[in-house]
Amino acid sequence: MDFQVVVLAGGTSKELVPLVSKEVPKPLLPVANRPVLSYVLEQLELSNLKDLIVVVEGEDAALRVGGWISGAYVDRLHVEVAAVPEDVGTAGALRAIAHHLTANDILVSIHFSRYHLCMQVVSGDLVSDVPPGAVAAAHRRHDAVVTTMLCSTPISGPAESGSAGAKDKIKKPKRFNIIGLDPTKQFLLYIASGAEVEKDLHIPKSILRAVGQMDIQADLMDAHLYAFKRAVLQEVLEQKPNFHSLRQDVLPYLVRTQLKSEILLNGTPQAEENGHEKFTSRGNQAIISQILANASTPRFHEVYESIHNGSPTAQRTHKCCAYIASNSKYCVRLNSIQAFSDINRDVIGEANHLSGYSFSAHNNIIHPSADLGSKTTVGPHCMLGEGSLMGDKCSVKRSVIGRHCRIGSNVKIVNSVVMDHVTLGDGCSIQGSIVCSNVQIQERVVLRDCQIGAGFVVSAGSEHKGESLARKEK
Amino acid sequence: MKFRSLRQIGFTDYAPISSFFPSSAVAMGAQKKGSSRVTEDAEELARNPLQAILLADSFTTKFRPITLERPKVLLPLVNVPMIDYTLAWLESAGVEEVFIFCCAHSRQVMDYLESSGWHKQPNFTVAMIESNNSISAGDALRLIYERNVIHGDFVLVSGDTVSNMSLTHAVKEHKERRKKDNNAVMTMVIKKSKPSPVIHQSRLGTDELFMAIDPDTKQLLCYEERGEHPRGAISLENSLLADNPSISLHNDKQDCYIDICSQEVLSLFTDNFDYQHLRRHFVKGLLVDDIMGYKIFTHEIHSSYAARIDNYRSYDTISKDIIQRWTYPFVPDVRFSANCTTKLEREGMYKAPEIQQSRSAHIGPFTVIGKGTRIGDDSRITHSVIGEGCTIGSNVSIVGSYIWNNVTIEDGCELRHAIVCDGVIIKAAATLEPGVVLSFKVVIGREFVVPAYSKVSLFQQPTAQDSDEELEYADSSSGAIDPSIADAGNKLNGDIVSESSQIQDWSTSQLGPGGAGFIWSACDGGCEEEWRHSVAPIPTDQLAKALLAIEEDSEIVKVSDSALTPSGELEPGSDDDDSDNMDDSNVDTVDFEKEAEATFLRAAQDNIAVDDLILEMNSLRLSYNKSAGDCTGALFYPMMKLALESPHNTAVELQKNVASVVSKWHKLFEVLAKEVDDQIELIMKFEEMCLESTKEFAPIFSQILYLLYEREIIGEEAILRWDDERKDADESDRVFVKQSEKFIQWLREADEEED
């Protein structure tokens, strides 16, 4: 496949402080002891999409990501890592790497930006049905200008699912997008995002007339995986220098103008664009009879075009497609600290096929080189990384513990994520917290719903609740 | 509503129970609030005959001038009066009791029903409700409500409906929904039919319709006909989406105007006496009103036929559908009313008996020829309907036209897409251009060419005022005129000579030699829209025009789009209201500062006492709803400017100027800037001034600060807190803190010493 994939991997995202730092940019944040980027890369590999550009914000972060990728995927994927300045937005990032885009036809961009790190993972058994490939296929099938992947909105928004309780049940599911689709659910006719979601809808009648029926859904959200026609994308980016974001500017623009395309589509794609029948051979008469007969063919774009071929200024259309991921697929964006701990829990819990590890009989993963003290229990849905040592009488429940951690005796770890090289003193109790790499936690520390930034030292006997502790960055 | 149910209780609880007699069928039907509900529901289903209200008046003027003389429901559709199609369908669909509401020409309707066999059908009763002063469907339903004849769910149709759908399913659906939700008052029947995207009308000639429907429950959420809103976009309230995760927006559905209603519908019309139109007022009213919570649902039919004759175009379309047998069993060769037997021949030709047809005459496909019609040599008739007893000469060409009964067409005439009513005479070699409508007994002169889309009647076109007041028929407002016209019609029967002398001297006719009738001018503004609703096919140049219009339209949409959002998209979190408010308060602040400055300068010039100025400032502050802090800030600037404006050469002199000004006005600040916060505000303001507007003060910042401290305008605490606040600030913001470091140091030490 001559798809070129752009992964917008983001940089140091403000939402995830203190988890991310200069040392650990967002793409390298470990989820179940693997960088989050690896999930995406492996899905792409499964879809046989091996020509990648990973775009990282900031030079430092790019170097680190590049280093990791070249180590991990050296002979499996052809990956280029490109650095872009921070705060250029997703459209800006693509603009910056425009000269890298060579694949003649189409480009899939996995949107991974500073706002929404899209971790997009799928059940591994069906290779042909894996979204990156499926999105690409849908894109090709309809000869679309843009194809976007949609997934159903989580029942309660990822941000609050952790604090589930009676309150959340009453609350209506959070809405991210309002999406209009044609009855076959293949074409994207309308999209509202951000603040527009809370406003009254204004749906252009022209598209409604062309398509006849539009299904408006509030329970779908944009999964930030797009396939673009390269020429179109580059043209839009060039012509509209004030477009900042793919999600908020480019996509709505393309959707809005699909019946009256302003894209010239010059150069090589032209031939193909003209490929789909336009009924030019038919005379005026045929067109009028078609209008009178209210002919409706499934491809409304062509019908619309054909109607307008009779007029002096022929209308040009382009197609915007949608691919809806089925409900059984797991699709969550890593865009908040809460989402991070949810994803960690899911990957070792319900969605454990994603982790790529084989689970033991106790439904947990303990690396063979890990060493457990006597009377220490590791419950189901847990993970213990390579070379970690645990003292006596410890208890671990629904938590991920990274590599080479040293954990003292009488330590309790519940619903938490402990990254690599962490030292935990005796008698600590850690609940619902995230402890980053190289943290040193001294004896009898009690942590509840805390985030401890990398390299921090928590002094002995202290108690913290709902705090975010990190070293001051110089 | 309440009133209605109270009456019902009164009726049922007292009458049957107190008398202990088994009530009549009608009374039982009304007995809804009985003792045991469960059994009653089942019984009700069994006992209550399905009722229907048939509105035999369209309350529009679309079929004028024909409807001046005959009600629309009696106009022949493929040689059978429209009302027969409706009644036959209602009967076959299991309706047992029909109330026919008639208003205009009610006599004619009643006479027709008397003469037809509808009164004699078993298990099918037809009752008439007559009114002389109803001008809308709303009036009609209010009248029916008063009559108290409807006892349960009923079917509401108009007398121009052609359908073969089965009602049982829709009625069952409606009743089941009612059981669960008492607010589900109406079920609308809809059918898939995509309007033309070019001319925005359906094949029935009705305007395009936008509907929002809940795909799961089929509840109707929005109903928008064309022209109600400026073109471009259809807007849905956000609250709709809050309740329904998904909505289907339809442009491809046609409203069949067949409604299954609950009794409440009638009382709703009575409660809302301004409801006139079924759709424009009633449906919209229910959808908008969220207090009562009444709901309307839709029932989509897929394989069966349902359509309403709304205008000439739908007359044409539905006639063709009937000839092409979409409406089976209501087709010409099946006897469903008093129509006579007609034989179906190849190519969709229907021929009644006793036709005299010349050998050389050619009758093309999809044509219906009525009983006793004579057709001359070399005449060609295709895609047309010819009524009974017509005489068609030789060399006549008829295409796509509807010729009613007893029409005489002389030799060499040419008719294309025209409607020709009873008793019309078209003299030799006359031509009817597409879209012509000839009303009853019109005579077209020899070789006369009737221009396209003209409507010709023996009656003069009513003046504009008339048509404004009376919606449908010229005679509908007063019953007195009605019979006179009917009389006229009767007298005219078959006798053209006496008629022409009686009503009008036709010697100066607009219709050629020997012609009789008036050509109606198109009603105001409707001229260019004539083609939309006529029987003639849409001309190509109109289509081209419409296409251009669409393009302009979408251009406009685009322009307004970009006007709304310059970057193409709304920024998340940006809120119009917010920014508006911001602007407002900004304007306020600027105003206030100007005012304050002016006040101060005036005081300085006129040497007004400080106390007076304080008073003035206070009132100004209150009127602008500002804090004391704002006030000091606003006053400080002009004061310093005053010092700056007085002549000085060196910084030292400037300092002296400031000292004199401050000593003069310090009381003002003592009063206004009592709070520490206000004093900090003052320092910040001064800082800002030094950086921006009056840079001259920058070098002597610390000295002036000391001066202000000395004069007790700024307290020690304020200075220290200002210093604290600036500790974490950027270097550039700390310039003045550094400058006054010594002074602050001194203050702190003094503070400690005091301790």
Image (tube, helix red, strand yellow):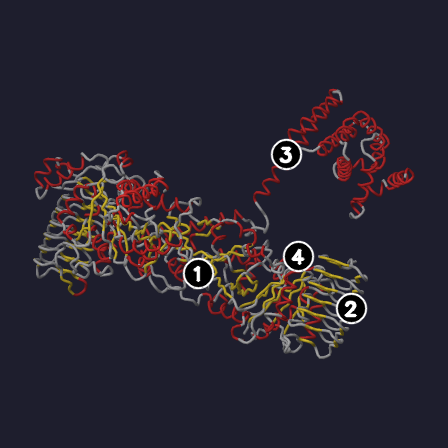
Name the mark on residue A182.
1
User: Looking at the picture, which amino acid does disc 1 mark?
Assistant: Asp
- Between label 4 and label 2, give the one nearer the viewer: 2
- Relative to A298, A167 lies left or right: right
Q: Earlier in the sequence, mark 4 or mark 2?
A: 4
Q: Give the letter of the chain under mark 4.
A: A
Camera-side residue: A365 or B443?
A365
Give SS at disc 2: strand
Q: Is residue B142 above or below residue A443?
A: above
Q: Quadrant of residue B684?
A: top right
* Residue, far right: B753
The residue where tag 2 is placed is A423
Q: Residues within 10 Å of mark 1 (few under 14, many from 20)?
A: many
Location of the C terminus of chain B by quadrant is top right
Location of the N terminus of chain B by quadrant is top left
- Between label 1 and label 4, give the one nearer the viewer: 1
Q: Is residue A304 above or below residue B545?
A: below
Is the C-beta separation of discs 3 and 2 under 8 Å? Answer: no
